[in-house]
Image (spheres, rainbow, N blue to C red):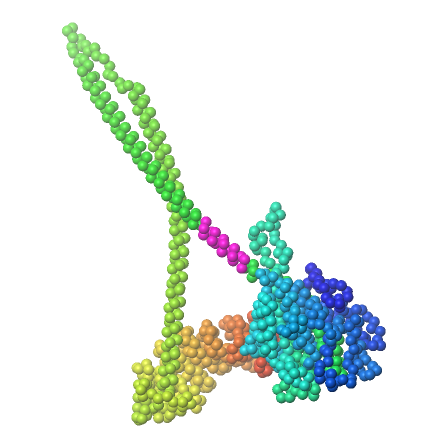
Amino acid sequence: MSAHSYKNGGSASRGGAIKFENYSNSNSKYSPSSSLKSKVQQPMPAASSLRRGSTGSGRDYSTISGRVRVAVRLRPRNSEEMVADADFADCVELQPELKRLKLQKNNWDSDTYEFDEVLTEYASQKRVYEVVAKPVVESVLDGYNGTVMAYGQTGTGKTYTLGRLGEEDAAARGIMLRAMEDILAEVSPENDLVSVSYFQLYMETIQDLLNPSNDNITIVEDPKTGDVSLPGATLVEVRDHKSFMQLLQLGEAHRFAANTKLNTESSRSHAILMVHVKRSVKGKDSSLSNENGNMTPVSKTLKPPIIRRSKLVIVDLAGSERIDKSGSEGHTLEEAKSINLSLSALGKCINALAENSAHVPVRDSKLTRLLRDSFGGTARTSLVITIGPSPRHRGETSSTIMFGQRAMKVENMVKLKEEFDYKSLSRRLEIQLDKLAAEYERQQRAFDDKIERISLEGQKRVAEVEQNYADALEKCQKDFMESKKRLEEQSSVKKENHGQRKVNVGVSDNGTDQKSNSQPPMLPNSSEVAELKKKLNSEILLRKAAETEVDSLNKQLIQWKNAEAARNSEIVKLRKMLEDEECEKAKLEEEIEMLQSQLLQISFEADQSRRNLDKRLSGQAPSSLDSLIPQPKHQQQREPADGDKASVVKLFEQVGLHKILSLLQSDDADVRIHAVKVVANLAAEESNQQKIVQAGGLTSLLELLRNSNDETIHRVAAGAIANLAMNETNQELIMSQGGISLLSLTATKSEDPQTLRMVAGAIANLCGNDKLQIKLRAEGGIRALLGMVRCRHPDVLAQVARGMANFAKCESRASTTGIKTGRSVLIEDGALPWIVKNANNEASPIRRHIELALCHLGQHEVNARDMINGGALWELVRISRDCSREDIRVLAQRTLQSTSGFQAELKRLRIDYG
């Protein structure tokens, strides 16, 4: 574990360099009550030991590692004080060389206090920055979190010290501008990143000063590390001083201020500037070496660079004030109360940390939650308290001094934040991958060209060899035939010569036979035979050599053809993939066109329905069926929106319910659509629901769902069924007539958000009936409800969440009444991941129902293990702390307390959920 150190800065650094250990708390358990707990290792003497008359024995506490450094700055007298207090001396006396100040109790007695730095009324803005903020800024550039905060009575110069822009006089620039100048001068534009967010805490509401429309930012806490973040705040990257100046001007223009007796421009909110610094660490990206000691390209590529993330928080607190002195009234009075309450909460936390208390009330105010890392956390903190010289405000001055004295007892454990920059490594690997892919494609093309060239050459050589072989064979055959012919001719000649020389055998005179004295036949010349054999052997050898060469070329040609076939196969695969992509693209385009046409159709139907509902009844007898059939456009007249309901009621009274229901079976599609809309409007009134059911309206609506293919009829019929399903008796009728199966089938087939919203609403109403739980799941109601989350429309998701909350509530009631049940059906059907994912949904209806569902699921002990593994426990903890509705928050707390599985897990993790 390496140690990192930095200078404590300023004249308060009497002990030289202070070292801080770079520790990792990734495995530590988070406890809200202990995250701001003081880390003081040895007891510190009380502030009274530094007063006059005390020995002040003890160690020098300005050298304690990570202690909050406090400086006091005196404001000069203003014009009003010069007149009103002309005959009175200042209530404070500064001793900057001793870093002390004396607070006059009366003309003959005073109290003496020591601080890390004492700044007189003549101290320049540059001096204040170098003493108070520059050491913190240097720490931030080294990778540590830092905080600079101003505290004091209203009108004592807090905003002047921190946020002065110095547009007319550059020497008057405040800490914010000077800190950003130093940061921008040190960071590298190519490798480092600096971004800022600027917001105010006004009346316990966090508002974005860079985007005024974002007026309710939520605080998000990491349940493991306790880190606080504001993901909803605007984060702007800063590259130069001019753009930062413009951001400050924009933020100051949106900050709340008021004119009081103590200050003409009194800040009515706490302003907080957060500067996020991301720096690359040079010299630490060591790589693996090969056997020769050289860096291999792979090791250089795969080693991620090291970056340091740090945060500078500059807090301009609103001034504390007494109502009788500031003269606040009306809304300004309410602002003053809110300011004093938040400052009081901060003071309680400082007191608890200074006294090393076991509990720190960090959750009493959003201000203390935002500053939990600044006091007792991991940031290096520097506090400047501002006071005035007027004896009329001696009480406020004394309170400010005591706040600073207590803050000096708080000690932080400063932590260096280093991490691997995997995003940069990923981008670098992607670039290298693109280069390698391009190089591979180039080599593949070169290889293909080479193969093609070799193939052509081989084919040419094979053709030449075959031609030579054919010519040689033809020549050999020709020579052979000529030799054969010549031999035959010689043989025939020799036979003729031999016949002429033959001597016939006759009988001699003395009676004895005598043979003619003939010569032996002539044999072929041996030299000619040898020559012929030699030529024949030569031809045989040539033929064998030609055959061998042809076989070799054939094998090589087969190899080339196999390689070419492999390439052709790969090309076919790629072409098939390309065709699949084109088909997929064509399908998507068709779906887009279909969705566009559906959108146009829905818009047309909405307009048509409004015109039908606003149409006056004609002057004919209302008993005619034509009163329900749409009339031509020239007969339509617009009515006020509040007359729609009266028109439907009048139609119901004059035509009759049975006749309206009979029109649901009409062959005319327009008549059916108009009739089902009238029934849906009637079903919205509770007084009509029983009449509709008794007249067979529910059965007719279910038949429409079963037999009709019209999307509009499905949507309106589902809406009417949803209205009827609000009655418990009607719910049982719907289930007995197979209504849940029809609703589930409609949800599966439809993609229209409005239809799905109606279907989900009907199923959600049925989910609230304890008697229908088993049948609802058996007939696919729960699966249909979960299937509708594919539609991301918030209205549909709100109805789905309501159904899950109703179903979970029924299961919770069953378990509390002693009925033995297993795991929740919602968990078994896989709804828990979706519930956890949407537990903090931006849409309040969805979030509210999901929070209720989690609370009801958690009340059943058998669900605890699944909820812990699925991350639902953390959401319950968040709901018990941050939910805006008190009843849900109390229900979540009761659930955590009553479930032993949750209790054991929270105890193991040392988490306080209160």
Q: Quadrant of residue 512?
A: top left
Instruction: Look at the image and tell me in which quarter the N terminus lies.
Output: bottom right
| Residue 441 falls inside the magenta stretch | yes
Residue 96 in the image: x percent, y percent?
78, 72
Instruction: Look at the image and tell me in which quarter the C terminus lies.
Output: bottom right
In the image, residue 762 above or below residue 148: below
Residue 646 in the image: x percent, y percent?
40, 91
Left or right of 555? Residue 332 is: right
Residue 666 in the image: x percent, y percent?
31, 83
| Residue 428 falls inside the magenta stretch | yes
Left or right of 378? Residue 858 is: left
Judging depth in this view, the residue of 443 and 391 nearest the camera is: 391
Residue depicted at x 35% and y 42%: 459
Give the magenta part as a residue range: 427-443
- Residue extending farthest to the front is 168
What type of secondary structure mainly makes up the magenta span?
Answer: helix
Q: Quadrant of residue 100?
A: bottom right
Residue 836 in the image: x percent, y percent?
54, 73
Judging depth in this view, the residue of 609 and 710 nearest the camera is: 609
Residue depicted at x 21% and y 12%: 518
